Amino acid sequence: MTIHALIALALFAAPAAMAGYALVYGIAKNGIDSTIVLNILCGASGMIVAIAAMVNLNALGETVFPR
């Protein structure tokens, strides 16, 4: 995988990370009082969603553009 492919995947995964963060924040903000714990939980969720998006986009790219 080239650096160009990683940059393209990161550009498409960034909105997914924000969506994952916002989803968990919206659900957990009323149940967790600690701001630090809430940010860690939401950040981890955003990273999980971003990684999943990158894996799915990479698999799609390898299927559509075989080498």
Image: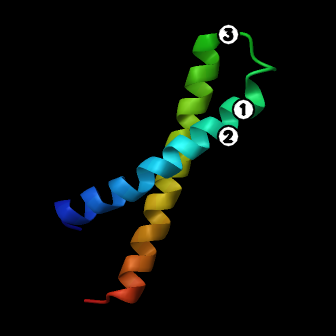
Kindly report the distance in space between the C-alpha atoms of the residues bearing marks 3 and 2. 18 Å
Give coordinates of residue 45: x percent, y percent: 59, 39
Distance (Cα) linking label 1 and label 3 = 15 Å
Asked if 16 appears above or below 32 in the picture, the reply is: below
Tag 2: amino acid: Leu
Q: Is 39 above or below relative to 52?
A: above
Q: Earlier in the sequence, mark 3 or mark 2?
A: 2
Using the image, determine if residue 66 lies above or below residue 41. Answer: below
Q: Circle 1 is placed at which residue position? A: 26
Tag 2–tag 1 contact (CB < 8 Å): yes
Q: Are marks 3 and 2 in contact (CB under 8 Å)?
A: no
Checking the image for residue 51, the label placed there is none
Residue at 49% x, 68% y is 56
On screen, residue 54 versus residue 37, left or right, reads left
Could you tell me which residue is drawn at 60 percent across and 44 percent down?
20
* Local secondary structure at mark 3: loop
> Which residue corresponds to the image point at 50% horizontal and 45% vertical from the top-left?
17
Figure quadrant of the N terminus: bottom left
Amino acid at pointer 3: Ser
Q: Marks 2/1: CA distance?
A: 5 Å
Q: Is residue 23 left or right of residue 15?
A: right
Q: Residue at x 36, y 81 (%)?
A: 62
Residue identified by numbered label 3 = 34
Judging by the rendered image, the residue that carries numbered circle 2 is 23
- Compare residues 38 and 12 and report the one nearer the observer: 12
Q: Quadrant of the C terminus?
A: bottom left
**Looking at the picture, how far across and down is residue 57, in whole percent?**
44, 69
Outermost residue, right direction? 31
Q: Secondary structure at mark 1?
A: helix
Of badges 1 and 3, the one in the foreground is 1
Q: Identify the secondary structure beneath mark 2.
A: helix
Front-most of residues 67 and 26: 26
